[in-house]
Image (cartoon, rainbow, N blue to C red):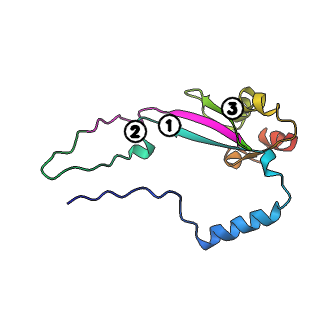
Amino acid sequence: MAKVRKAERRPPLNKTHKLKLQDWAKKYPKTDFPKVLWTDEMRVSLDGPDGWARGWIGKGQRAPVRLRRQQGGGGVLVWAGIIKDELVGPFRVEDGVKLNSQSYCQFLEDTFFKQWYRKKSASFSCRTMLHHTRPSTPQRGWQERV
């Protein structure tokens, strides 16, 4: 017959992941996490994540034709943050902008920090900050200033 598997709700944590989480928690035991701004980005497209398309096809029925786009088909890159129980953003990264160190700093200046600076005693945490930084890049200034 047919079989469809539901996507996992979260990636499985192995022993190494759990130990790293414990080490991280021990390193920051007195951090006031309701004052930390957590940020992340996500690419959104009409094709779903990685063009994933599944569904049930009854016996004797033909699978529907799926239109395909060549070379990506576009999408929108969106950034957002969460501080305590408040959403900061989301903000759309303009089409054609390649996020390198300098464009990333400019993006933060134009979007996040306009709202974030209203939060007097917040900290800044970006899961992907290290992807965009090298020891001599402008981000280091943001991290120290923030």
The relative height of residue 108 versus residue 63 in the rendered view (above or below) is above
Instruction: State which region is magenta.
Output: 66-82
Q: Check contact, mark 3 vs mark 2: CB within 8 A.
A: no
Closer to the observer: label 3 or label 2? 2
- Identity of the residue drawn at 41% across and 35% down: 46
Dot 2: few (<14), some (14–19), or many (≥20) neighbours within 10 Å?
A: some
- Identity of the residue drawn at 69% across and 32% down: 103
The relative height of residue 84 versus residue 117 in the rendered view (above or below) is below
Q: Which mark is residue 47?
A: 2
Which mark is first along the chain, 3 or 1? 1
| Residue 104 in which image quadrant | top right
The relative height of residue 131 versus residue 110 in the rendered view (above or below) is below
Q: Badge 3 is on which residue?
A: 103
Residue 60 vs residue 78, the one in the foreground? 60
Is 75 contained in the magenta span?
Answer: yes
Q: CA distance from mark 1 to mark 2?
A: 9 Å
Instruction: Name the secondary structure under disc 1.
Output: strand
Q: Which mark is residue 7?
A: none
Closer to the observer: label 1 or label 3? 1
